[in-house]
């Protein structure tokens, strides 16, 4: 039965093919009869389609957004004039450029065009990335020359890409004839010679950099623009077009005068901003003229389209009769094909759907085909229903992701704020304890005070762990690679932990392979943090034993690596616990079952830091016999840094008494710093906010100022800026920032405000005295 049905289906399709062949012959005959009439409108239609090329339109927009009146024009004016009111307009140019680049991509560009678009996009991103730094430098009062050097971006790739794209667009427009093609190319060339890489660009660069080559470029571009304008005027322009071209020519002439005037003023040593004010040209008329000329060109193209429409209307009536006949034939053909498709395709699909429903619903159901089932539209409805459910689930997932991201951001801010606030009382606890320990005390009092200080150090370690954990999660920790002395890092680790080890009857040893270079390139602070964490854990779980810190060189997959090992003969770690010790908030109990101090973040932080350095962290242990932790990081030997004689003697220099102003809003911190300084023989005066500090610096003479950063009334950054602006000798007083925020970004902000250096809270006496010693040497 099914075989006969298939034979019948094949015969039906043969009939369809024969019918289609006859129909095609009829249509071909009709096509030949109208062929010559269609040729009459082909040229006009080709003119319209090529002239309306989207590439031409978008490239003209990109030139405008990049150059004259666009991104580079506004960016250079912002550098020259320090007017932050130009920022919104510059940000609008960035958005327009991105939108037009995406619109170009929708046209299906070739691989070469895509590479050129990417080059332009990267250059725009570079300018956008520099905007934040530009605003900071303007607020810091830097000169235009310094700002230009700091925010300079290479334009070569983007200019080359624009030229390539324009050549492709002009090739597409080869179908344009006569003056139309010259008009389009002329307008595009005027924008190129005026803006990005043109006259305005070169002129602004000359003002900022004083390079005579830019001056020559600006003159050449001005002459080129004038020549293009004169050429346009030979193309029989309308009165409106002629008026706009004359306005454009007047602006170019004004710029030529400004170029000559700038050449005379620049060697006089005048301020660049003053020169810019004296040679400034009003661009409004020229910008409006370019926009109007573009609009006039668009109107001209629309008029050509009307010509095409009229030509088509002339033959529209005659073709209508032919199309009606063809339409009737196609309608009959469609009905016939629809019948065959229904019988040969839709009915089998219905039977298949019924079988699937029987399998998924009830495997015992009758699988026989029912020809009276609903038609194919039911399948589409089921698919649409599935898509609706998927879209709803995707929306829920997106909302949950946004909520999670917001919660993570809130948590990060909370951790940072809490850790910052904890450092202030910690500063008082640790600092006051150090002062007490340096005063006459009984043995019992020294013991109790030592316990207070030790508790403060433990709390500081916990705060640092939490802060490091938060920053590692957010990817905000950057390595600072400097020459590091292996012996110094090992000795410093042992020195810090020596008292703790002695209290547990444990011996600390170091072993350094003699083949190792004494100095390596790395982040000394983070490597020392890793050593302290691993060795502190080893001491914590080792009583009356030995902890060995060793360094050796090894080869890993043809790459030289530095292997740092910490070995102890303490209580060891069970196999079950060894698998989870690198997890966050996990801790190993002591042998007596007691929970040890700490957050459980130490080894997790070590693992993250080692991974950031491009290394690996491993552990071996046997319960009751001890543990062996290894850190493997890239081995990069280097030369010892050159240290000046003054810096080499800074630890031993005797600092003479200084007159010091302490600016701190917290009373405990003020008392602590004052006691430390007075104990060293310095004369100390105090202020509780930045406004008082500025007044004190005006009225008195100080050798150094210790400035807290976060204070009421006026913060330390603003106070530093105002002191640096004072007319008397106070502007040169060394200012040391005192802050709990010591990341690289924080240091840059303090430096931009005018601070010479910063020291971290909680304040340690050694760090404070070292800062004073540094300025004593200077």
Image (tube, grey):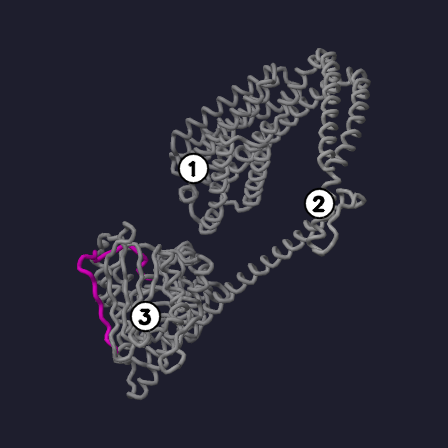
In the picture as drawn, the residue positioned furthest to the front comes out as 1
Q: Earlier in the sequence, mark 2 or mark 1?
A: 1
725 relative to 31, above or below: below
Determine whether, in the image, residue 20 is placed left or right of residue 738: right
Label 3 packing within 10 angstroms: few (<14), some (14-19), many (20+): many
Q: Nearer the viewer, mark 2 or mark 3?
A: 2
Identified at 82% across, 18% down, the residue is 321
Residue 580 at x, y percent in the picture: 41, 68
Query: Is 747 included in the stretch rendered in magenta?
Result: no
Q: Any mark on residue 621, and which?
A: 3
In the image, 94 versus 277, the foreground residue is 94
- Which residue corresponds to mark 2? 352
Determine whether, in the image, residue 124 is placed left or right of residue 443: right
Identified at 38% across, 56% down, the residue is 612
**Element assignment for label 1:** loop
Q: Any mark on residue 154, and which?
A: 1
Residue extent of the magenta highlight: 506-525
Distance (Cα) linking label 1 and label 3? 55 Å
In the image, 702 versus 490, the foreground residue is 490
Image quadrant holding the N terminus, namely: top right
Taking the image as drawn, is residue 712 in sight? Answer: yes
């Amino acid at each position: 039965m099914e075989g006969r049905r298939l034979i019948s289906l094949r015969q039906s399709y043969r009939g369809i093919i024969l019918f289609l062949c006859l129909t095609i012959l009829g249509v071909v005959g009709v096509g030949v009869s109208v062929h010559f009439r269609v040729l009459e409108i082909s040229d006009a239609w080709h003119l319209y389609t090529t002239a309306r090329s989207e590439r031409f339109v978008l490239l003209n927009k990109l030139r405008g957004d990049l150059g004259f009146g666009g991104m580079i024009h506004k960016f250079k004016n912002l550098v020259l004039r320090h007017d932050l009111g130009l920022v919104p307009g510059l940000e609008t140019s960035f958005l327009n450029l991105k939108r037009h680049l995406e619109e170009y991509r929708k046209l299906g560009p070739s691989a070469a065009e895509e590479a050129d678009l990417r080059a332009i996009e990267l250059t725009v991103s570079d300018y956008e990335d520099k905007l934040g730094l530009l605003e900071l430098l303007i607020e810091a009062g830097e000169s235009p020359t310094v700002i230009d050097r700091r925010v300079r971006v290479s334009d070569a790739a983007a200019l080359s890409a624009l030229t390539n794209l324009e050549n492709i667009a002009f090739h597409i427009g080869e179908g344009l004839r006569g003056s139309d093609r010259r008009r389009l190319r002329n307008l595009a060339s005027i924008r190129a010679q005026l803006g990005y890489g043109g006259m305005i660009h070169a002129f602004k660069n000359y003002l900022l950099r004083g390079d005579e080559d830019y001056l020559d470029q600006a003159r050449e571009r001005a002459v080129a623009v004038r020549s293009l304008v004169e050429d346009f005027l030979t193309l029989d322009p309308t009165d409106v077009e002629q008026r706009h071209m004359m306005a454009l020519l007047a602006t170019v002439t004004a710029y030529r005068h400004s170029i000559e005037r700038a050449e005379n003023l620049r060697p006089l040593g005048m301020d660049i901003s003053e020169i810019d004010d004296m040679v400034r040209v009003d661009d409004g008329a020229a910008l409006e003229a370019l926009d109007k000329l573009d609009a006039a060109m668009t109107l001209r193209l629309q008029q050509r389209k009307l010509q095409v429409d009229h030509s088509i209307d002339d033959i529209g009536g005659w073709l209508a009769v032919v199309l009606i006949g063809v339409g009737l034939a196609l309608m009959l053909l469609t009905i016939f094909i629809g019948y065959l498709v229904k019988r040969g395709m839709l009915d089998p699909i219905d039977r298949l759907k019924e079988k699937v429903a029987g399998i998924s619903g009830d495997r015992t159901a009758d699988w026989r085909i029912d020809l009276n089932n609903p038609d194919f539209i039911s399948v589409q409805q089921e698919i649409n229903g599935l898509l609706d459910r998927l879209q709803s689930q995707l929306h829920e997932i997106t909302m949950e992701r946004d909520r999670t991201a917001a919660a993570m951001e809130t948590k990060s801010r909370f951790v940072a704020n809490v850790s910052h606030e904890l450092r202030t009382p910690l500063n008082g606890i640790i600092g006051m304890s150090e002062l007490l320990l340096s005063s006459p005390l009984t043995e019992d009092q020294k013991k109790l005070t030592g316990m207070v200080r030790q508790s403060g150090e433990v709390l500081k370690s916990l705060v640092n762990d939490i802060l490091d954990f938060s920053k590692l999660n957010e990817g905000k920790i950057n390595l600072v690679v400097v020459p590091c002395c292996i012996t110094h890092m090992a000795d410093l680790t042992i020195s810090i932990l020596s008292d703790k080890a002695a209290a547990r009857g444990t011996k600390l040893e170091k072993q350094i392979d003699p083949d190792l270079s004494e100095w390596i390139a790395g982040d000394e602070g983070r490597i020392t943090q890793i050593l302290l964490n691993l060795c502190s854990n080893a001491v914590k779980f080792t009583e009356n034993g030995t902890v060995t810190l060793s360094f050796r060189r090894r080869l890993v997959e043809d790459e030289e690596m530095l292997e740092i090992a910490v070995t102890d003969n303490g209580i060891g770690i069970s196999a079950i616990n060894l698998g989870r010790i690198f997890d966050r908030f996990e801790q190993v109990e002591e042998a007596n079952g007691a929970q040890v101090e700490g957050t459980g973040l130490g080894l997790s932080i070590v693992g993250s830091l080692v991974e950031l350095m491009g290394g690996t962290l491993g552990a071996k242990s046997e319960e009751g016999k001890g543990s062996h932790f290894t850190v493997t990081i890239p081995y990069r030997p280097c030369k010892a840094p050159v240290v000046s004689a003054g810096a080499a003697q800074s630890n031993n220099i005797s600092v003479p008494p200084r007159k010091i102003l302490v600016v701190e809003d917290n009373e405990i911190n003020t008392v602590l710093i004052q006691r430390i300084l007075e104990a060293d023989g310095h004369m100390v005066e105090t202020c509780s906010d930045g406004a008082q500090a500025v007044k004190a610096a005006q009225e008195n003479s100080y050798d150094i100022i210790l400035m807290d950063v976060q204070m009421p009334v006026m913060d330390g950054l603003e106070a530093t800026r105002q002191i640096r602006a004072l007319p008397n000798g106070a502007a040169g007083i060394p200012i040391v920032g005192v802050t709990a925020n010591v990341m690289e970004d924080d240091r840059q902000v303090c430096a931009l405000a005018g601070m010479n250096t910063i020291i971290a809270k909680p304040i340690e006496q050694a760090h404070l005295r070292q800062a004073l010693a540094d300025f004593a040497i200077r």
